[in-house]
Amino acid sequence: MQATRLLASRAPNRLSGSIRVPGDKSISHRALMLGALAVGETRISGLLEGEDVLRTAAAMRALGAEIIRDQEGTWHIAGRGIGGLAEPDDVLDMGNSGTAARLLCGILASHPLFAVMTGDASLRRRPMGRVIEPLTQCGARLASRMGGRLPLAVEGPRQALPLDYRLPVPSAQVKSAVLLAGLNARGETRVEEPAPTRDHTENMLRHFGAHIHVEPAEGGRVITLTGQPELSPTDLTVPGDPSSAAFPIVGSLLVPGSEIRIEGVGLNPLRTGLFATLREMGADLAVARQWIEAGELVGDLTIRHSALKGIDVAAARAPTMIDEYPILAVAAAAAAGLTRMRGLAELRVKESDRLAAAASMLSANGVRVDIEGDDLIVHGSGHPPRGGGTVVTHMDHRLAMSGLVLGLATEQPVVVDDTSFIDTSFPGFVALMASIGANFRPA
Ligand code: S3P
């Protein structure tokens, strides 16, 4: 990670052009993990080469998979097969990535080996109890610091038992940890989620040939996986990350005269809550063309500057846009009227406490914000916010990018205290935004 840098962003004339955003982070982690569990060579193009995903690649190598990147940027994985992972001879460092840590815990829990996992200061503060609890049911022993924090040690049983688990919170990471553990358990693993969460693990397991069954249940879903399949290696292309596309999208909506196109963005309906919400606020955001790739919906987007209005965002939408609230809060700050975003308890346990940090980002820049229980309320005036403040990012990539986009729409420049973490999910963000006209420079 580079040393702390300071960047101010200032309103440009307009944003315009055609871009691609880096590969989807969630799908990239899963592609590397399942590739390592297949028998034979998997090839991945469009893999996100951000810090978080590189940690997963390093961890899967430490577990015995051969992973190389060729000169064209395609990643080749020689998988070890389910049950075939080797014991790592050192601590696995998952950096800033909660997804990498939680999903890998699932894989490790059903392999008869001992492994220790740690992460950076942000990840070491995040709760792992939510995966420790279900994973012990397969016979694994997991020990962590107080409060279920990393570092954590896992010792898998000789023969893992299948799991049957109802998620207490809608979390794709916990669901995925349980399903990945179930891969090396004899029999059927069953997981029930109270509300549908991103289903990339299910889609990709199917793509690698696993038998997986999904049915609706009480507002959510029940997913059943048949254990110990032989995963077949495959070729896949990772779509652009809709959570990354969110930043140029909101920038273009807020800067007058803007019109941009973003090609090849993942449009899985369990990821596109932000797009629906922005449209309800009055955004001109259209899908030009769409297709399916490796079981995932993908499309090209066009976005034009739009006058936004404040709205009420129901808690039920949270699982489909959980990472997008900081940037939605920026859109709400420039919208006319009040936006209430309901049911954001999960934001408190992300890379930072995003509920508090998003509120501070806006209030430091002249926007009135309230937090009531788990709701975030932004009072938009319909005019450019004042700006002139410093955004404190707390090692959180999405806060850094949200702060920079906020500065595109404010009267005075916005300073972001640390942009180094942007590389965890969006390497090249500053240059890509500059290519469509954004003006970011050292503060
Ligand atoms: C992710 C799931 C989400 C999301 C994270 C990526 C995934 O977390 O915030 O950035 O890839 O499964 P939760 O499922 O814990 O809400």
Image: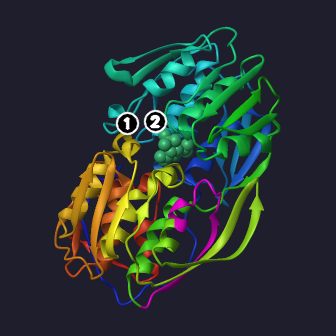
Above or below residue 420? Residue 79 is above
- Where does the image place residue 42, in percent across and percent down from the top left? 76, 44
Q: Residue at x 55, y 67 (%)?
A: 276
Q: Return the disc, 2 or 1, that comes first in the chain's sequence.
A: 2
Residue that sits furthest to the front in the current view? 218
Would you call the spot at circle 2 few (<14 residues within 10 Å), some (14-19), or many (20 or more)? many
Q: Find numbered disc 1 in the image and state the secondary structure of the residue it sits on.
A: helix
Rendered image quadrant of residue 401: bottom left
93 sits left or right of 442 in the view: right
Q: Which residues are magenta?
A: 257-276
- Where does the image place residue 312, in percent across and percent down from the top left? 41, 63
User: From the image, which quarter does the C terminus lie in?
Assistant: bottom left
Q: Amino acid under label 1?
A: Leu
Residue 259 part of the magenta-drawn span: yes
- Where does the image place residue 316, in percent across and percent down from the top left? 51, 50
Residue that sits furthest to the top in the current view? 158
Q: Give me the disc on residue 94.
A: 2
Would you call the spot at circle 1 few (<14 residues within 10 Å), some (14-19), or many (20 or more)? many
Q: Amino acid under label 2?
A: Met
Q: Give me the disc on residue 23.
A: none
Q: Are marks 2 and 1 in contact (CB under 8 Å)?
A: yes
108 sits left or right of 359 in the view: right
Q: Residue at x 69, y 26 (%)?
A: 190
Q: Residue at x 41, y 78 (%)?
A: 308
Q: Residue at x 63, y 31 (%)?
A: 192
Residue labelled with disc 1: 123
Ligand 1 within 8 angstroms of badge 1 C-beta? no
Colour scheme used in the picture? rainbow
Pick the residue in front: 155 or 324: 324
2 or 1: mark nearer the eye: 1
